[in-house]
């Protein structure tokens, strides 16, 4: 069972709060959710929306076709009515609002709505849309939100501006009523959300006054389930980093990365086992140059240190990453990938920076690049990134796209309870620090580490000898160069293939879908629902690339790449490393998540016809 | 300690002002008994960047990137506030490519010392104009007279919130040493802009040129220290006025010192009470290789 629900509204009008209350109600009822927040690069007024999948089993994706659309503003109706296949819940008082008066709506989306309405000879108003939907057998529940608001104002004697905020709650109350959910779960969620008594009172009144207005069409009965929490990618990364020992994080504000840092700062005092009190120092720096370089500085003292950014900020970090490679610094950069190039689509997603993550910074040096694909692995990957940095004493880049950062899903408590492993850095012993060689040549290329303060230690971005002293001598250069690079061979030998590639579905299937990052979500749901007989190969670590293993998995298969970029960059990396060419590609450039239904259609098209390349573009 | 200290061979030009700066810093550290592992000298790029490599003592050196020494130092100091952190960087390094960090360091007031080697030129790249070279001057290797104005680093530092602002002269090593000592013992962010001839590329601001102009603030009874909140504003204004004097007479010494402003470490401590006892560098993160953090301690708080 899977139900897709969507609500929207002007940014800053409380859509976020309402959607969160909706999700937590669904979770209280014992169902899994996967939710996504789409928003403009804007503070107030532009259209933002939440699309939420509800399921009785774990869910990692959305459908572009929506079962229930709950709208209390006209733009939400105009934006999304063509995505609707089930029920519209709409505020009757906006019926006369016209499409032309939607000042902030993109022309492209307006024109699409106009052409649908014009074909039917309908007026360009919400009423016109409602008539259209009825004509295609979509049930419309028009409720007069304004009269409910008036009643709240009168009964509770509160100001109109406050009561108007309850419109969101009316929309979710009607939705849950339609879903056949017990009202008490919603009231409980509202109580937990609004600590302010007045807010609780008028919002719960909004529920009481609206719940019985529409009959239920679904039966979302309370279900026995494990305990789970709804968490987004930003939060999961923050928690994983802290679990992995992060104690210093620097950042410069940038969407969609900063939420991670502000979450850490808000929770920086740590109540650890055995009553140990820890603390994470979070520094908002003046720019990303300072963010990366202060994180590197912190790492030199032995603290586990990281920064978080997205494309534009990562560009500024390139020189620092090169220094960290040269000086063998265990530092983690969490790379929140968004629509690029340049400022691109700052609040939307993208996968076009993969090669940049792999190559940023001048010169050759080992770096590890890992990319998460599903929410539950974001947390463990974030801790793993810190472990890998410590083990190989080199920069580690952890890629999380906007489509994971700003989407959330229900994570079972058991998965959160797991205590993550800490691979401690190899430390120099008391004898060797007397005449300490920071860059001592060793069998595996990894030199024993001593933190600043422990002994005389030298670092230099110039080529250096084993002490860290500047040296331009040719043979020393060759020796130290090889020593640094050797760490990548060591990593290639040590990091298990299972950590680098995840395989889902039928190993004997004719088609193998090669992907990385967030498209793993809809692909794993397609597999879980047995919709297609395919093998999904998700690359998680791009450097060191699991070449021989992946070659074996992909042999004798017809390959399809699924990515959010133009050139199928993950497939290009495959070719670079193995010579294997992926000819068939499903690509999405719109910055929106890949929906399960559109991906299913595209895969079918590729499998059943002779098509090689399909661009998909659902979503607003 | 028993092993003989191996240091790198100094390759600065004969007569370079850097010699005075390194000697003053070494003497200050020795006198303060900080000539050991607790001191970390962070440097940028350029001739000044090599300074830690040439120090004849058991300090640590972090030779960083052009313009970014302050950023590295920020992370080092905040992750382990017990370390004594000194930054040595050039004028181009600090006031040019690193200007953003220079200004913003004043907003934080981290307890560190920034020593700027101010010679008006980019020496290691053969003498281009640096941010402190005055408009119209044509030093030896400039193809044409400098068409950019000079900034006044002391005034910028004062306006940015540095709580210790001083100017030294590389050829008055003893005087400079005293300033360095005061800067190290000062609680907060300290700038020492050190006037430093570049005998190779700056043929205008030579030793002779400086010797005629510099005078010590102490000689005119200058009192830089803010003793109460009520006199902070007045002393700051006076210090900025004094900083702007830079022509036939050039004052050196401590222009301004205010320890009444909380350091960044104090401010972190107000958010994390045990920060100084248990800073990031010294925290326990695991027990036998297993994380000692339970994510539910935060999730349940947030929920």
Image: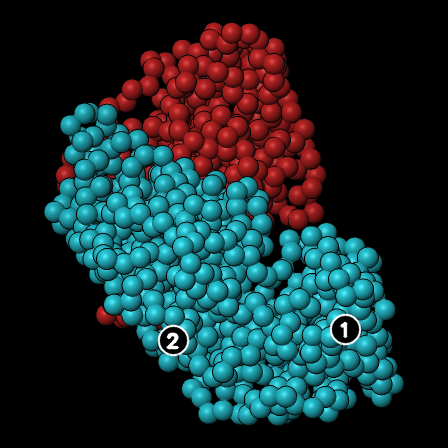
Q: Where is mark 2, residue-wise?
A: A530
Q: Nearer the viewer, residue A356 or A190?
A: A356
Q: Is residue B146 positioned above or below A123 on the image? A: above
| Residue at the extreme front | A609
Q: Nearer the viewer, residue A533 or A464?
A: A533
Q: Where is mark 1, residue-wise?
A: A130
* Quadrant in the picture for the N terminus of chain B: top left
**Colouring convention used in this rendered image of the protein:** by chain
Mark sitting earlier along the chain (1/2): 1
Residue under the image location 15 percent in, 48 percent down: A444
| Residue A41 visible | yes
The 10 Å Cα crowd at callout 1, few under 14, some 14 to 19, many 20 or more, is many
Q: CA distance from mark 1 to mark 2?
A: 36 Å
The 10 Å Cα crowd at callout 2, few under 14, some 14 to 19, many 20 or more, is few
Q: Is residue A286 positioned above or below A48 on the image? A: above
Chain identifier, colour cyan: A
- Which chain letter matches label 1? A
Q: Quadrant of residue B72?
A: top left
Q: Position of residue A39 (x, y in %)?
A: 63, 59
- Which chain letter matches label 2? A
Q: Position of residue A84 (x, y in %)?
A: 64, 71
Q: Relative to A229, is A129 on the left or the right?
A: right
| Residue at the extreme left | A443
Q: Nearer the viewer, residue A17 or B196?
A: A17
Helix, strand, or loop for circle 2? loop
Helix, strand, or loop for circle 1? helix
Chain identifier, colour red: B
Q: Relative to B75, is A553 on the left or the right?
A: left
| Residue B61 visible | no
Q: Are marks 1 and 2 on the same chain?
A: yes
* Quadrant in the picture for the C terminus of chain B: bottom right
Q: Relative to A319, is A8 on the left or the right?
A: right
């Amino acid at each position: 069972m899977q139900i897709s629900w969507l609500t929207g509204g002007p940014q800053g009008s409380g859509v976020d709060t309402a959607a969160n209350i909706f999700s937590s109600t669904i979770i209280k009822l014992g169902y899994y959710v996967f939710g996504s927040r789409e928003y403009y690069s804007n503070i107030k007024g532009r259209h933002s929306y939440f699309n939420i999948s509800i399921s009785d089993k774990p869910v990692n994706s959305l459908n572009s076709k929506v079962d229930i659309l709950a709208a209390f503003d006209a733009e939400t109706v105009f934006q999304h009515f063509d995505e609707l296949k089930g029920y519209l819940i709409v505020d009757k008082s906006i019926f006369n609002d016209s499409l032309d008066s939607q000042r902030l709506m993109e022309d492209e989306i307006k024109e699409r709505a106009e052409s649908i309405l014009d074909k039917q000879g309908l007026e360009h108003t919400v009423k016109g849309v409602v008539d259209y939907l009825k004509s295609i057998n979509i049930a419309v529940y028009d409720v007069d939100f304004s009269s409910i608001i008036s009643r709240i104002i009168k009964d509770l004697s509160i100001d109109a501006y406050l009561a108007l905020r309850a419109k969101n709650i009316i929309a979710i109350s009607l939705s849950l009523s339609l879903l056949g959910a017990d009202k008490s779960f919603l009231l409980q969620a509202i109580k937990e959300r609004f600590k302010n008594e007045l807010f609780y009172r008028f919002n719960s009144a909004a529920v009481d006054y609206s719940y019985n207005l529409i009959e239920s069409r679904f039966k979302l009965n309370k279900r026995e389930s494990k305990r789970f929490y709804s968490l987004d990618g930003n939060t999961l990364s923050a928690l994983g980093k802290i679990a992995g020992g992060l104690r210093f994080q620097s950042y410069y504000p940038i969407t969609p990365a900063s939420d991670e840092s502000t979450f850490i700062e808000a929770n920086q005092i740590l109540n650890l086992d055995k009553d140990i009190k820890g603390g994470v120092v979070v520094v908002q720096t003046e720019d990303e140059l300072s963010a990366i370089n202060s994180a590197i500085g912190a790492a030199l003292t032995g603290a586990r240190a990281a920064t978080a950014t997205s494309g534009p900020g990562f560009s500024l970090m390139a020189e620092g990453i090169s220094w960290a490679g040269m000086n063998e610094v265990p530092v983690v950069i969490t790379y929140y990938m968004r629509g690029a190039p340049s400022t691109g689509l700052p609040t939307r997603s993208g996968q076009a920076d993969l090669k940049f993550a792999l190559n940023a910074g001048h010169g050759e040096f080992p770096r590890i690049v890992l990319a998460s694909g599903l929410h539950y692995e974001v947390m463990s990957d974030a801790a793993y990134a810190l472990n890998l940095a410590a083990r190989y004493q080199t920069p580690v880049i952890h890629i999380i796209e906007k489509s994971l950062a700003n989407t959330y899903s229900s994570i079972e408590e058991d998965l959160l309870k797991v205590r993550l492993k800490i691979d401690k850095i190899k430390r120099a012993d008391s004898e060797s620090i007397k005449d300490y060689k920071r860059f001592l040549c060793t069998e595996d290329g990894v030199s024993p580490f001593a933190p600043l303060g422990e002994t005389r230690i030298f670092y230099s971005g110039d080529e250096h000898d084993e002490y860290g002293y500047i040296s331009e001598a040719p043979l020393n250069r060759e020796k130290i160069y090889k020593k640094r690079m050797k760490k990548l061979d060591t990593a290639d030998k040590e990091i298990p293939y299972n950590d680098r590639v995840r395989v889902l579905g039928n190993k004997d299937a004719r088609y193998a879908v090669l992907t990385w990052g967030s498209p793993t979500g809809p692909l794993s749901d397609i597999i879980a629902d047995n919709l297609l007989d395919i093998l999904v190969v998700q690359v998680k670590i791009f450097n060191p690339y699991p070449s021989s293993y992946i070659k074996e998995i992909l042999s004798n298969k017809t390959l399809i790449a699924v990515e959010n970029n133009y050139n199928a960059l993950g497939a290009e990396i495959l070719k670079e490393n193995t010579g294997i060419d992926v000819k068939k590609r499903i690509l999405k450039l719109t910055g929106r998540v890949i929906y399960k239904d559109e991906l299913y259609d595209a895969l079918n098209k590729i499998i059943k016809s002779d098509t090689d390349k399909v661009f998909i573009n659902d979503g607003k | 300690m028993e092993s003989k200290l191996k240091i790198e061979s100094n390759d600065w030009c004969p007569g370079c002002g850097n010699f005075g700066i390194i000697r003053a810093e070494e003497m200050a550290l020795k006198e303060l008994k900080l000539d050991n592992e607790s001191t970390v000298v962070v440097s940028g790029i350029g001739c000044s960047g090599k300074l830690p490599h040439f120090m004849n003592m058991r300090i640590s050196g972090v030779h960083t990137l052009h313009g970014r020494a302050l950023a590295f130092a920020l992370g080092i100091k905040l992750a382990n506030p017990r370390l004594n952190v000194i930054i040595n960087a050039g004028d181009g390094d600090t006031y040019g490519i690193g200007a953003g960090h220079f200004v913003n360091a004043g907003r934080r007031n981290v307890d560190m010392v920034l020593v700027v080697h101010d010679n008006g030129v980019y020496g290691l790249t053969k003498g281009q104009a640096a941010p402190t070279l005055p408009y119209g001057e044509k030093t030896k290797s400039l193809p044409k007279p400098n068409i950019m104005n000079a900034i006044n680093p002391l005034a910028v530092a004062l306006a940015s919130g540095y709580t210790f602002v001083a100017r030294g002269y590389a050829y008055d090593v003893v005087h400079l040493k005293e300033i360095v000592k005061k800067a190290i013992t000062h609680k907060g962010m300290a700038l020492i802009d050190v006037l430093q001839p570049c005998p190779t590329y700056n043929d205008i601001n030579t030793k002779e040129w400086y010797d005629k102009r510099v005078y010590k603030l102490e000689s005119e009874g200058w009192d830089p220290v803010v003793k109460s909140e009520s006199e902070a504003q007045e002393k700051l204004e006076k210090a900025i006025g004094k900083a702007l004097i830079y022509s036939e007479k050039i004052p050196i010494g401590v222009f301004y010192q205010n320890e009444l402003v909380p350091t960044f470490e104090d401010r972190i401590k107000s958010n994390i009470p045990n920060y100084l006892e248990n800073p990031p560098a010294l925290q326990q993160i695991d027990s036998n290789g297993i994380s000692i953090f339970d994510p539910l301690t935060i999730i349940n708080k947030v929920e």
